[in-house]
Amino acid sequence: MPSNDARILAQAAVPTAAVGAVAAVISGVVAGGKGVIGAVVAALVVILFMGIGLYVLQRTAKSLPHLFQAMGLMLYAAQILLLFVFMAAFKNTTLFHPKAFALTLVAGTLAWIAAQTRAHMKAKILYVEPESTTGGKPEKSGHSS
């Protein structure tokens, strides 16, 4: 993963982990140990799902730039669907507190989206290739006499 992509991933994952930690503390106070487990699991799920999505989207942008927008829309729809499936699969679990899990999942997802948006806005990403400074003559384009 190029350094820009890794930087954006870190700038999105760290605030999401912080939101997960705060949610774990609040869930621990409100719901006890099962609340902590639910919040931690939710934060890990958000970081994993969104991190994989960011990686796939960056690979698509580099290899198939003409599919970038469609892939982004499909990817976010798939991520939301997978999160709903994950929530449905664990809605009646006794392993962790389901409400703490669900609220942390929503808060973590919103934190990830906000942090990723901020990271992209702050990134200095070139959208054109800079000219080479090797000193070679530029190639002529068009018809010359």
Image: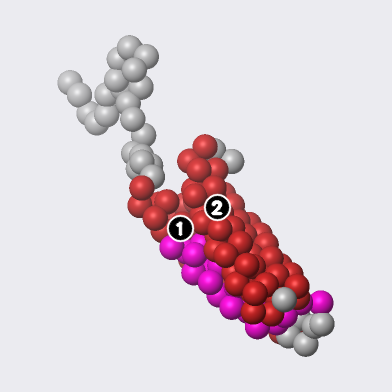
Question: Is 64 on the left or on the right of 123, as rendered?
Answer: right
Q: Main secondary structure of the magenta part?
A: helix
Q: Which amino acid does label 1 sit on?
A: Ala
Residue 24 circle label: none
Q: Give the range drawn in magenta.
A: 95-114
Q: Outermost residue toward the top?
A: 135
Q: Earlier in the sequence, mark 2 or mark 1?
A: 2
Q: Which amino acid does label 2 sit on?
A: Val
Residue at (24, 31) in percent of width and height: 142
- Which of the pair 64/73 is nearer the observer? 73
Instruction: Give how far apart the Cα atoms at labels 2 and 1 are.
Output: 9 Å
Magenta span contains residue 133: no
Above or below 42: residue 11:
above
Question: Is 133 on the left or on the right of 99, as rendered?
Answer: left
Residue 115 circle label: 1
User: Of circles 2 and 1, which is in front?
Assistant: 2
Question: Is 32 on the left or on the right of 67, as rendered?
Answer: right
Give how far across and how far down residue 135 sits, in percent: 33, 12
- Callout 1 secondary element: helix
Residue at (31, 22) in percent of width and height: 139
- Callout 2 secondary element: helix
Q: Outermost residue toward the front?
A: 29
